[in-house]
Amino acid sequence: DADVTQTPRNRITKTGKRIMLECSQTKGHDRMYWYRQDPGLGLRLIYYSFDVKDINKGEISDGYSVSRQAQAKFSLSLESAIPNQTALYFCATSDPSGTDEQFFGPGTRLTVL
Amino acid sequence: KNEVEQSPQNLTAQEGEFITINCSYSVGISALHWLQQHPGGGIVSLFMLSSGKKKHGRLIATINIQEKHSSLHITASHPRDSAVYICAAGITDKLIFGTGTRLQVFP
């Protein structure tokens, strides 16, 4: 079984709809991250969390919110989706007590019409 | 100017060729990461290095801290090496990513 899972894997929605992307991990890592990837651009950090009570904005947090329900779960919400949020979204985890290696989920392809 | 820049953006090669992908960064780093993104989208970490050189199979990563430059080499390239290779600067618990190099290796 995959260590970092994301649901859904693909989603098509309409402008103005609320949507939640979910991430779960079995690696026991405290740190979790949400990124988006757009063609021609590098991965960009949306939000990150170093433990359940620690949530931080990344470089492109506008229009997004997150919830860290447990050590293993980190959800990303788009309160009112807009077409320029169409992208590939990745969740990742890391373990600060080991190396800084990040472990990525399989990605969610989101299309906002 | 991006803090992490990669070159080339696209690279095609014949099977067996030696491949080099370059990464330059303009910030202080704790480590330089190389990742591989498969055609299906999944991302895996290949290397993390803060000095010198690391080797794993046919892949070699080097870093020159003074010049703020890293290279990823693939020896005896194979079609299964076709992927996007991404370098990322590790800075205070976060990563800043380059835009990636798309490699296609033809038989």
Image (cartoon, coloured by chain):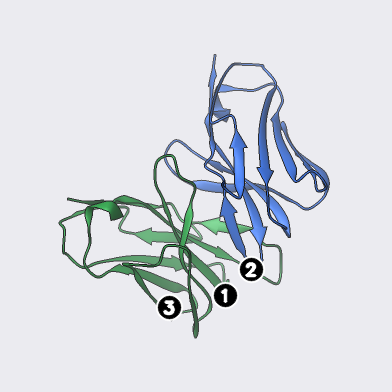
Chain colours: A green, B blue
Label at residue B7: none
Of labels 3 and 2, earlier in sequence is: 3
Label at residue A95: 2
Q: Chain of mark 3?
A: A
Residue A24 at x, y percent in the picture: 43, 67
Circle 1 — which element?
A: loop
Q: Chain of mark 2?
A: A
**Mark 1 surroundings: few (<14), some (14-19) or many (≥20) residues within 10 A:** some
The amino acid type of the residue labelled 2 equals Asp
Vertical comparison of A90 with A68: above or below: above
The quarter of the rendered structure image containing the C terminus of chain B is top right
Q: Residue at x 72, y 55 (%)?
A: B31
Residue tagged 1: A30
**Mark 2 surroundings: few (<14), some (14-19) or many (≥20) residues within 10 A:** some
Residue B53 at x, y percent in the picture: 82, 42
- Quadrant of the rendered image containing residue B75: top right
C-alpha gap between disc 1 and disc 2:
6 Å
Residue tagged 3: A68
Circle 2 — which element?
A: loop
Of labels 3 and 1, earlier in sequence is: 1
The amino acid type of the residue labelled 3 equals Arg
Residue B32 at x, y percent in the picture: 70, 51
